[in-house]
Image: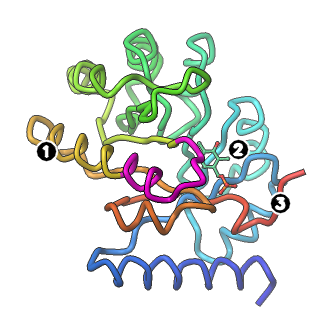
């Protein structure tokens, strides 16, 4: 096995064991490939990984072109400007960073009729940080309702990036607030099945609170340039 295959294998085993320790099913692994070459994506694809996350539309489109023949599920996880909604709606399978009504409308307008519905997560600024994208906890319900109105959009759940607080209990509390919000919104939107929480540094805490998808870059590919 190459070293990246080995890391992938070990990471999957680790996620599974952590989840089992909390009596939960293993979360899906989203391989975050920003600033990694297409060759690294191809190597992980050969190891069985299918879901990849990118932050920038242009960078992702260059990789799509290079890897066009591979069956990859592409997730956009970075902030999305409304003027890039067209490219995002056509070239991604999921957008995890939906945080405003205007963006919902633009994505609905640009997803073409011959494509399956675009899978969306509402990004929540769970720690109310000035610097971060994401809607407030109070706005999340209206955004979910707005997405659910469009037949070419599929509301799949929520995503958040809690503040990197050194106190693990505070980080865990942010994940818990997301889990509670998710459970509340699911009453009106039973199709919601994805709670995207946890990165290389805090996946264990996120899994403890019920993450169903972890987004891992560094622990899989190594440090980015
Ligand atoms: C970069 C990024 C990740 C992955 O971060 P790592 O610490 O490298 O695992 C996950 N989610 C988002 C939104 C990111 O921007």
150 up-or-down from 180: above or below: above
Residue in the foreground of this view, choosing between 132 and 3: 132
Q: Which mark is residue 190?
A: 1
Residue 75 location, quadrant: top right
Q: Residues within 10 Å of mark 1 (few under 14, many from 20)?
A: few
Identified at 55% across, 38% down, the residue is: 92
| Residue topped by disc 3 | 223
Q: CA distance from mark 2 to mark 1?
A: 32 Å
x, y (%) of residue 33? Answer: 71, 53
Residue in the foreground of this view, choosing between 64 and 113: 64
Identified at 43% across, 79% down, the residue is: 18
49 up-or-down from 105: above or below: below
Per the image, label 3 sits on a secondary structure element best described as loop
Identified at 81% across, 53% down, the residue is: 36
Instruction: Confirm or reject: label 3 Cβ below 8 Å from ligand 1.
Output: no
Sequence-first disc among 3 and 1: 1
Disc 2 versus disc 1: nearer the observer: 1
Q: Which mark is residue 120?
A: none
Q: CA distance from mark 3 to mark 1?
A: 38 Å
Q: Residues within 10 Å of mark 3 (few under 14, many from 20)?
A: few
| Residue topped by disc 2 | 64
Per the image, label 1 sits on a secondary structure element best described as loop
82 up-or-down from 173: above or below: above
Q: Is 172 within the magenta?
A: yes
Sequence-first disc among 2 and 1: 2
Residue 154 location, quadrant: top left
Q: Which residues are magenta?
A: 163-175
Identified at 45% across, 34% down, the residue is: 127
The quarter of the rendered structure image containing the N terminus is: bottom right
x, y (%) of residue 210? Answer: 32, 61
Q: Is residue 114 left or right of residue 131?
A: left
Disc 3 versus disc 1: nearer the observer: 3
């Amino acid at each position: 096995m190459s070293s990246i295959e080995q890391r992938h294998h070990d990471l999957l085993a680790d996620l599974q064991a952590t989840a089992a320790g909390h009596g939960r099913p293993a979360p899906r692994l989203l391989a975050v490939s920003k600033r990694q070459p297409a060759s690294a994506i191809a190597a992980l694809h050969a190891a069985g990984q299918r879901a990849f996350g990118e932050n920038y539309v242009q960078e992702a489109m260059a990789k799509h072109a290079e890897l066009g023949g591979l069956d990859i599920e592409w997730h956009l996880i970075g902030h999305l400007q409304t003027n890039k909604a067209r490219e995002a709606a056509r070239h991604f399978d999921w957008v995890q960073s939906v945080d405003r009504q205007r963006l919902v409308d633009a994505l609905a307008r640009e997803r073409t009729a011959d494509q399956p519905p675009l899978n969306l997560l509402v990004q929540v600024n769970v720690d109310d940080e000035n610097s971060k994208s994401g809607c407030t906890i109070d706005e999340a319900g209206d955004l979910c309702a707005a997405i659910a109105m469009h037949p070419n959009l599929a509301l799949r759940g929520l995503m958040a990036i809690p503040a990197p607080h050194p106190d693990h209990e505070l980080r865990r509390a942010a994940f818990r607030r997301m889990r509670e919000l998710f459970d509340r919104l699911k009453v009106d939107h039973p199709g919601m099945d994805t709670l995207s929480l946890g990165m290389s540094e805090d996946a264990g805490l996120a899994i403890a609170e019920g993450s169903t998808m972890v987004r891992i870059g560094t622990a899989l590919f190594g440090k980015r340039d």
